[in-house]
Amino acid sequence: MRIKIHPDQLIAKHPELSGLRDRISEAAEVIIKTYTAGGKLLICGNGGSSSDSDHLVGELMKSFENRRPLDISFKERLAEISGSRGKYLSEKLEHGLPAISLSSHTSLTTAICNDIDPDLVFAQQVIGYGTENDLLIGISTSGNSKNVIDACITAKAMNMIVVGITGKTGGRMKEYCDILINVPGE
């Protein structure tokens, strides 16, 4: 199945992104390719970018605009296992697109920061969660967040595709991104 990428609505709302149309489309295509191959997204960032990571994961793990209903066979299996509760689950649950925000696991992130090095908080998780079928999205306004850069380096070493979302210059992070979406702003 071929899914068409339509960046036009985004560009219409944010014309300053028109110069990024091809890169946005390319990023969408590699995300679709990742999911088609059975991979998942790992997403990281600091501060507001951490909130962006969490938000993206929320939109992927549950439906955004279009519900993703469970397969009939799985719905039937739920009902077989637990009757009315299984039927309720089959009506309410939906397929998610696997994604993990690397800044969301407080116990893990504080353990890494305390026991290893705070700059390695995302890189360690890339090693633990990532496979070469996965994709890393690193978000950094400056493009110079050391912990996001280290995650990008680690992902590249694992043969993962890396998509960076940064401000205008791309910072040092651009060196480690397969696709850089450097938004024209600070």
Image (cartoon, helix red, strand yellow):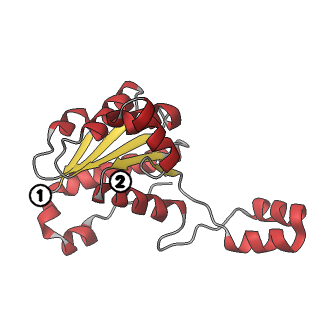
Identify whether 170 is placed above or below 63: above
Task: Look at 67% across and 68% down and name the residue there.
Answer: 93
Nearer to us: label 1 or label 2: 1
- Tally of numbered discs: 2
Q: How crowded is mark 1: few (under 14 residues within 10 Å), some or many (20 or more)?
A: few
Q: How crowded is mark 2: few (under 14 residues within 10 Å), some or many (20 or more)?
A: some
**Element under label 1?**
loop
Query: Which residue is nearer to you in this view: 17 or 144?
Result: 144
Quadrant occupied by the C terminus: bottom left
Query: Which residue is nearer to you in this view: 51 or 106?
Result: 106
Query: Which residue is nearer to you in this view: 17 or 89?
Result: 89
Give the percent coordinates (x, y) of residue 158: 42, 27
Q: Which amino acid does label 2 sit on?
A: Ala
Give the percent coordinates (x, y) of residue 177: 26, 38
Question: Are circles 1 and 2 on residues that touch, CB within 8 Å?
Answer: no
The residue beneath circle 1 is 186
- State which quadrant residue 88 falls in: bottom right
**Element under label 2?**
helix
Is 135 positioned to the left or the right of 138 in the image? right
Q: What residue type is labelled 1?
A: Glu
